[in-house]
Amino acid sequence: MKIMLEEINRKIKHHASAFIQEANAAYLAQLNHIAENIALHRDKKPIILLSGPSGSGKTTSALMLEKILDEQGIETHTLSLDNYFSPLTEQEKELFAVGKLDLESPTRIDSPFLTEQLREIYHCRPVELPVYDFKESVRVNSGKILHRKPGELVILEGIHSLNPEIITFKDSRTAKIYVSVRTRIERNGVLLHPSKIRLMRRLIRDNLFRKRSFHDTLMMFHSVEEGENKYIMPYKYRSDYDVDTFMPYEICAYRDFLLETFRKRSGEPLVQDMLAFLEETESLPTEAVTPDSLICEFIGNGQFV
């Protein structure tokens, strides 16, 4: 799919509130449709695997789907695959310190432990959920017990959730969702690739909430893309449901966050196409973005973050 930048600008300029509301509703409609199907098969498939590349909106999509199902009277729990990372060895810590550890690799997941927990959850037996301490690079017990009851659902979200070598739990017991930006923005016959929308999201999120500079996130772009092509994209065909997380108004909300930084780096090929689009994009104040928007995962002030 594609949308003209000219159309986005016109709607932001004259009908911003309605445009935002319409886009949010369209995204929610995708999740509602999926929730209906998941609800029909919840007894056979109580485990929902949700995957997508970095910056795709996995966390918000999972939490919104949980909310929809909860409101239907189907108790749903969301777990993050990040909490099933294996603790780093001393050698891995040394590699990490010099930027030589592949952080995107599925081998970072403790697959046997994860599979064991999924099996217990499926059979409605209590498990103590883990939490990963990224500062110390260790996995610890959270003290939180999950005891799924018959009819309840569990969503597991993470970049490797569709990888059968990591999630060795039976396919017949899971529903699979792949989320990503699919729509392209067109300007003067030129298309902005969805990966650049996801990069804009990461630049803002990393800077606001992860204390990472724009420079560092930009420098990681190619390695992140390589990891996605190697570890995530090969398994998206396994999904039962695909979700386009593109919000037509989002580039307008990102403009003021990124424009000046991009202008200062205008000589860098990586930012040139994004800068060209942002230069001609109408600005949308952050406060105009409603708390139920998926992009609040990246700009903040959302009800799901």
Image (spheres, rainbow, N blue to C red):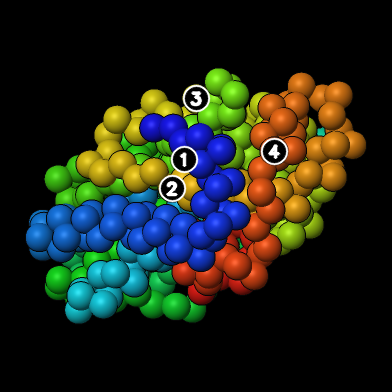
Q: Residue under circle 1?
A: 181
- Look at 35% across and 33% down and name the residue there: 236
Q: Earlier in the sequence, mark 1 or mark 2?
A: 1
Q: Is residue 194 left or right of residue 68?
A: right
Residue 151: percent from left, percent from top:
15, 71
* Secondary structure found at label 1: loop
Q: Earlier in the sequence, mark 4 or mark 1?
A: 1
Density class for disc 4 (Cα within 10 Å; few <14, some 14-19, many ≥20) is some
Distance, label 1 to label 3, CA atoms, is 18 Å
Comparing 48 with 110, the one in front is 48
Amino acid at dot 1: Val
Q: Are marks 1 and 2 in contact (CB under 8 Å)?
A: yes
Position of 154 relative to 279 (above/below): below
Q: Earlier in the sequence, mark 3 or mark 2?
A: 3
Q: Which mark is residue 245?
A: 2
- Look at 27% across and 75% down and name the residue there: 70
Amino acid at dot 4: Glu
Mark 2 or 4, which is nearer the eye? Answer: 4
Distance, label 4 to label 1, CA atoms, is 21 Å
State the quadrant of the C terminus.
bottom right
Residue 262: percent from left, percent from top:
81, 38
Q: Residue under circle 3?
A: 230
Mark 3 or 2, which is nearer the eye? Answer: 2
Q: Are marks 4 and 1 in contact (CB under 8 Å)?
A: no
Amino acid at dot 2: Thr
Q: Earlier in the sequence, mark 3 or mark 4?
A: 3
Density class for disc 1 (Cα within 10 Å; few <14, some 14-19, many ≥20) is many
Density class for disc 2 (Cα within 10 Å; few <14, some 14-19, many ≥20) is many
Q: Residue furthest front?
A: 14
Q: Earlier in the sequence, mark 1 or mark 3?
A: 1
